[in-house]
Amino acid sequence: MGRNMQLVACTWTPKLFVGLMGEIAWPVIVLVLGWRLRGDIGAALSAFFSRHDVEEVTAGVTGIRAKFVATQQDPTHAETGISSPDLLPKGGDYEAIKAKQGEISTEFSALLYLQITRQTNSLEASDGDKITLLSQELSLYQAATRFEAVRKVLFRSQFDLFSEQLFENKAISNIELNTFFEALPAKFPGAYTEWDSIKYMAFPVTSQLIENDDSGYKLTLFGRSFVAFMRRNPHFIDEMAKI
């Protein structure tokens, strides 16, 4: 050995080994799991951030934190087409409606048509009763489609406001609304930057969930139906943007 070289003895005791494993085990496991599950994690993150606007993301020893901004209901972000669609083209006769259906028909829609036709033909009912039954079924589908379009944009706090304070055919005054809204920034820091109560109620009004008259804001017929539908499907409530 050279003059300047020193020998350092290291005894691998069970305590030392366990301590070392405690230092490196979790980082290694996290890296391995992250590599093995990178596809699923990437898909989940992509789906999550596609539904939420993020202002800032920070990473540290305690994990990852994201700061969200409530821009989902901004005019440039809010989805369109929420107004009630026409069931059939206005002013069209039978042939015009058939032609329109032919323009948007697909192989899958044709398959569904055959399945529905077979099912209705198997019913022991008059043609009039079958038409009534199909019309009722279509109305339920149209309602659910419109409910879903609103649910994807509405905030959980807005739904809670409608469900708890407006559902019993009661109105909420501007003063009560301002009091409710002013409490939100403390609950959701950074979420409502540059928002006020008017902007907060803009989407619910334009989507025809609520209306404003001399008594204040109150639910419309569509709004009451929407709240009732969501209450029957609580998993939809849980999926709403939690701001």
Image: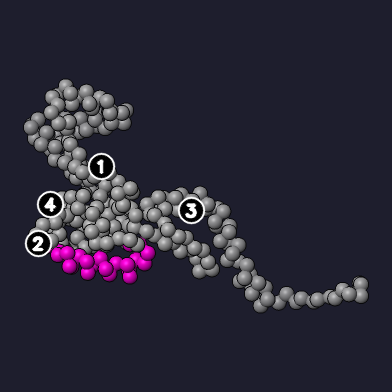
Q: Earlier in the sequence, mark 2 or mark 4?
A: 2
Q: Nearer the viewer, mark 1 or mark 2?
A: 2
Element on which disc 4 rests: helix
Q: CA distance from mark 3 to mark 4?
A: 41 Å
Q: In front: 163, or 180?
A: 180
- In which quadrant of the rendered view does residue 155 lie? bottom left
* Residue 73 as seen in the image, left or right of residue 2: left
Q: Are marks 3 and 4 in contact (CB under 8 Å)?
A: no
Report which residue position mark 3 lands on: 41
Q: In front: 69, or 5?
A: 69
Q: Which mark is residue 131?
A: none
Image spot of residue 225 (x, y percent): 16, 52
- In which quadrant of the rendered view does residue 83 lie? top left
Q: Earlier in the sequence, mark 4 or mark 1?
A: 1
Q: Are marks 2 and 3 in contact (CB under 8 Å)?
A: no
- The reply to whether residue 158 is in sight is no
Q: CA distance from mark 3 to mark 1?
A: 32 Å
Report which residue position mark 2 lands on: 215
Q: Amino acid at mark 2?
A: Ser
Q: Quadrant of the N terminus?
A: bottom right
Instruction: Say if 152 sits above or below 96 in the image.
Output: below
Kindly identify the residue that appears in the image at 51 percent across and 49 percent down: 39
Q: Amino acid at mark 3?
A: Ile
Numbered range of the magenta stretch = 170-192
Q: CA distance from mark 1 to mark 2?
A: 29 Å
- In which quadrant of the rendered view does residue 212 lie? bottom left
Report which residue position mark 4 lands on: 221
